[in-house]
Image (cartoon, coloured by chain):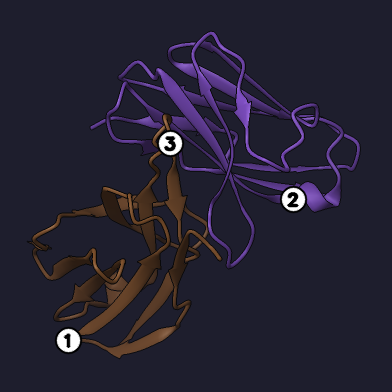
Chain colours: A brown, B purple
Amino acid sequence: RKEVEQDPGPFNVPEGATVAFNCTYSNSASQSFFWYRQDCRKEPKLLMSVYSSGNEDGRFTAQLNRASQYISLLIRDSKLSDSATYLCVVKGTDSWGKLQFGAGTQVVVTP
Amino acid sequence: GAVVSQHPSWVICKSGTSVKIECRSLDFQATTMFWYRQFPKQSLMLMATSNEGSKATYEQGVEKDKFLINHASLTLSTLTVTSAHPEDSSFYICSARMGDGPQHFGDGTRLSIL
């Protein structure tokens, strides 16, 4: 079983609509979670950290469900520029704190 | 903000060539550096982790004699793909971290071996 699993999509979203997707993780001891954004042929960029109580950053809302071991990302009022692959990332519990990446969920926002 | 520079951004070379990729932290001291590889439509896969001045720790299945990593200073790590073959063609990304701080990613190197 993969450490971090995501629905690869693509999620085709009309501009202005809301889209949400989840990611599951296997290590129940994990403490730190992130959403990264990766554009085609580019490096991943941190979108937001995910906190236990859930958190919002503008149009982006992240939630953590420890009991079911999943995190979610919701994008409201989608913009064309939101088209990207969203990577779910879990910080490992090893001494290095290695990041475990999901394969990403592709979001395509259409006019 | 913290900047990590990776060079070159794109490499095309013949099979059997060795290729060196540099990763520099421009405005902070990178005590730990990570090297990842990403194949199309797949997740970033960690290849190795290194602390400055120490030998790199390789992930299972990554050949240390094939992928030579040097982290000689707090601002520079290099990855050398020795005798590269077409199956080594991939997107290689480094990241750097100071202490237990956040990881900052380089902008990646696209390696194509003909």
How many marks overall? 3
Q: Earlier in the sequence, mark 1 or mark 3?
A: 1
Q: Residues within 10 Å of mark 2 (few under 14, many from 20)?
A: some
Q: Visible in this render: residue B33?
A: yes
At label 2, which amino acid type do we have? Ser
Lateral position of residue A77 relative to residue B25, left or right: left
Name the residue nearer the viewer: B84 or A91: A91
The answer to whether A92 is drawn above or below residue B22 in the figure is: below
**Residue A9 coordinates in the image, percent (x, y):** 45, 82
- Residue at 77% x, 47% y is B88
**Residue A31 coordinates in the image, percent (x, y):** 26, 48
Would you say the residues marked 2 and 1 are in contact, meaning their CB atoms lie under 8 Å apart? no
Q: Identify the image quadrant of residue B36.
A: top right
Q: Quadrant of the C terminus of chain A?
A: bottom left
What residue does disc 2 label? B89
Same subunit, labels 2 and 3: the answer reads no
The answer to whether A100 is drawn above or below residue A39 in the figure is: above
Distance CA(mark 2)–CA(mark 3) = 29 Å
Q: Identify the image quadrant of residue B69.
A: top right
